[in-house]
Amino acid sequence: EIVMTQSPATLSVSPGERVTLSCRASLGVNAHLAWYQQKPGQAPRLLIYGASTRATGIPARFSGSGSGTEFTLTISSLQSEDCAVYYCQQYNNWPWFTFGPGTKVEIK
Amino acid sequence: EVQLVESGGGLIQPGGSLRLSCAASGFSVSSNYMTWVRQAPGMGLEWVSVIYTGGITYYTDSVKGRFTVSRDDSKNTLYLQMNNLRAEDTAVYFCARVEYSISSGAFDIWGQGTMVSVSS
């Protein structure tokens, strides 16, 4: 099983600030890495796939980078509606998909 | 509109059974890989099961032998039959589409989730 880790666990940020979330895989996953946003009481929403491609309808302030074992999700300018938990997921090791534990982004 | 709608959750005693449904619209479940993901209260996401277009199924170890994923192509619906339920199966269960042609495996469409509570 590929273990995904995320840091930090919680991030408190002021509106307009740049946010950087990290995700690490225990084994290389190429670029088969997705990011999801989950707000309280809602289903996860796909933000990024292929490590860096925004899903349909996702604002340009969200960007992803990385390959292999190290990945980053960046929110260029945090908006209030971006408060959520962000999960990374590897889908390189089919069918044993694994998620990271999540990073909670709060407004300071 | 492309969407997934789950149903079938509820309160069940340990050892009991429950069948979750996931009705799809706007696309065909038979032409897509479909998956179940669960989220225990206050916890993260855990992949549970997947069914391939050809009908092959896979499960996470903790549910193997107890859960069965299937689909009814005529109803365009995905199912998760859960037997011998345990307290640790308590979670919100989401169904999702595994997008393969562009992303090679990201979960692009999610249902709203259905809550399963296992307790005596």
Image (cartoon, rainbow, N blue to C red):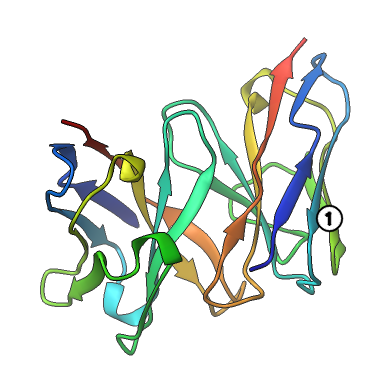
Amino acid type indicated by mark 1: Phe
Q: In this view, does B42 lie to the left or right of B22?
A: right
Q: Which of B8 and B5 is in front in this view?
A: B8
Rendering quarter of residue B19: bottom left
Task: Say which residue appears at 57% left-offset and 78% top-offset.
Answer: A94
On screen, A99 above or below B58? Answer: above
State left or right for residue A53 relative to residue A91. right
Tell me the residue at 66%/49% (across/down). A100
Q: Residue at x 63, y 76 (%)?
A: A93
Can the viewer see residue B112? no
Residue that label 1 marks: A71
**Place of residue B77 in the rendered image (x, y in percent of width and height, measured from the top left):** 19, 65
Residue A102, percent across and down?
Answer: 66, 39
Nearest the camera: B44 or B7?
A: B44
Which part of the image, by quadrant, shows the N terminus of chain B?
Answer: bottom left
Residue A19 to residue B74: above or below: above
Q: Which of A105 and A17 is in front in this view?
A: A105
Vertical placement of residue A106 versus B21, above or below: above
Question: Compared to B5, does A69 lie above or below?
Answer: below
